[in-house]
Image (tube, grey):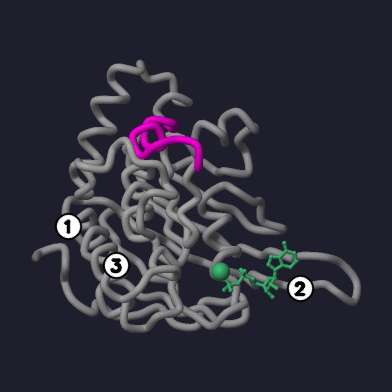
Amino acid sequence: MIIQTKNLWKTYGSGDTQVNALRGVDLTVNKGDFLALVGPSGCGKSTLLHMLGAMDTPSRGEIMLEGRELGKLGEGQLTDVRLERLGFIFQTFNLVPTLNALENVMLPMKFAGISRREAKQKALCLLDMVGLKERTRHLPAQMSGGQRQRVAIARALANDPALILADEPTGNLDSENSEKIMELLQNLNRKGRTIVMVTHNPELAERVNRVVYMKDGQLAELQRNTKDIQSA
Ligand SMILES: Nc1ncnc2c1ncn2[C@@H]1O[C@H](COP(=O)(O)OP(=O)(O)O)[C@@H](O)[C@H]1O
Ligand SMILES: [Mg+2]
């Protein structure tokens, strides 16, 4: 098991405007899972992903990441966890606009204290892996959405995370680029990467090995092996 939530609640606001975004979520993600978290807009998917990513704290309940309870870690330890154990991929890519592809991928390694030389070598390797060998000096604005997302995936892998968290990673892409990103994520999973992907696209959910449905802040149904991509 990589990450587990126990009776997770998240309440935003207070009084009349109070929203229970998560209402008792128990979720276990195992090593090697490619899990799709599916559900309608507003059901709490991003909220849950933020909790898994140690980017926000629950109102109640606990989260165990690789045997450590996140709620018991200090701010410095949480920063290290985010930087070294987790990789994030966002719908809007979130690249640093003033840095080129290579520098964007090097950034998390720089923060983790890895030498410039080693970081550069690894970043080049990762960019090659996502098919961007020829684009390492391009700025985000000089790349297509699909290329930007591939840079973001390379960046997410920089510090060899235990868990990759992706929030609607193909939400801003056309179908051709979505397809490329899905193939890339499936390949990473086949190589042993554990991925939790938020999507509201049921077709994408056909391509992962676990689908978890979410509704009104609860996991409505824990389900099926759509196909055994581990053995592919
Ligand atoms: N920062 C916030 N403050 C207040 N309410 C929020 C906040 N973030 C999310 N919500 C509310 O929590 C619920 C779940 O939101 P979210 O997790 O973003 O859903 P999803 O990602 O499934 O669309 C929604 O009702 C949303 O309006
Ligand atoms: Mg969302």
x 27%, y 59%: residue: 185
Q: Are marks 1 and 3 in contact (CB under 8 Å)?
A: no
Residue 63 appears at what percent x and percent y?
54, 52
Magenta stretch contains residue 162: no
Q: Secondary structure at mark 2?
A: strand
**What's the residue type where badge 3 is placed?**
Asn
Q: Which residue is mark 1?
A: 190
The answer for how far apart the CA atoms under marks 3 and 2 are is: 35 Å
**Residue highlighted by disc 2:** 19
Residue 177, numbered label: 3
| Above-or-below relation of 206 to 72 | below
Q: Answer whether labels 3 and 2 touch (C-beta < 8 Å).
A: no
- Apparent side of residue 5 relative to residue 154 in the rendered image (left or right): right
Q: Which residues are magenta?
A: 97-108
Is the residue at mark 2 in contact range of ligand 1, meaning its CB lies under 8 Å from it? Answer: yes
Circle 3 sits in a helix, a strand or a loop, which is it? Answer: helix
Q: Secondary structure at mark 1?
A: helix
